[in-house]
Image (cartoon, helix red, strand yellow):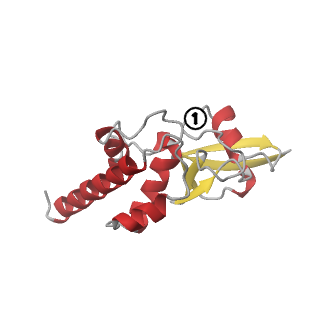
Amino acid sequence: MRAFTLRVNGETHTFDLDPATPLLYILRNDLGLRGPRFGCGLGQCGTCTVLVDGRPVRSCITPASAAEGEITTLEGLAQDGVLHPVQRAWIDEQVPQCGYCQNGQILTATALLERNPNPTDEEIRQGMNPILCRCMTYYRIQAAVRRAADTMAASASASADGR
């Protein structure tokens, strides 16, 4: 057992746990966050994805002691009760069917748009490729990423114009 500190969704938490404990277990069991989910347990499906300093990380295979930086979960994307543009686009495009993979899809799309604010459809497909969707909603996912990119660009433009 060892004490270590994690910064999750803007809040600092200290834990006394085995350093090898998967980050996913701490997020779900100790912090009660339900965004990241256990999928394959091997880091292959992406259901457990969180952002660590803006990079997608598989929390099921990442030891909590190695998660240095700001951790953002699905719950941490919305600000002051306003959904993140990616979350809003997911709703507007009616992406989810079963919804199980949506945590990984949304966080991966968020990271993609931070790296590349205006991706082509091919770049969206490549960027979203690591996250598996058993319901095959890939075309809706692509449409939602495109919608979020457009919304974010319009917002940035309005901010630059002083509106």
Q: Is residue 83 found left or right of 49 in the rendered image?
A: left
In this rendered view, identify the residue nearer to me: 28 or 95: 95
> Is disc 1 placed on a helix, strand or loop?
loop
Q: Is residue 23 found left or right of 157 in the rendered image?
A: right
Q: Residues within 10 Å of mark 1 (few under 14, many from 20)?
A: some
Amino acid type of the residue that numbered disc 1 sits on in the rendered structure: Leu
In this rendered view, identify the residue nearer to me: 33 or 99: 99
Q: Give x and y (percent) for residue 162.
A: 14, 61
Residue 89 versus residue 65 in the image, above or below: above
Q: Give x and y (percent) for residue 152.
A: 28, 57
Quarter that holds the N terminus: top right
Residue at position x 65%, y 39% from top?
38
Residue at position x 71%, y 45% from top?
41
Residue at position x 35%, y 41% from top?
83
Circle 1 residue: 33
In this rendered view, identify the residue nearer to me: 122 or 35: 122
Q: Quadrant of residue 26?
A: top right
In this rendered view, identify the residue nearer to me: 96 or 81: 96
Quarter that holds the C terminus: bottom left
Residue at position x 83%, y 45% from top?
18
Q: Give x and y (percent) for residue 157.
A: 19, 63
What is the tally of numbered marks visible in this picture?
1
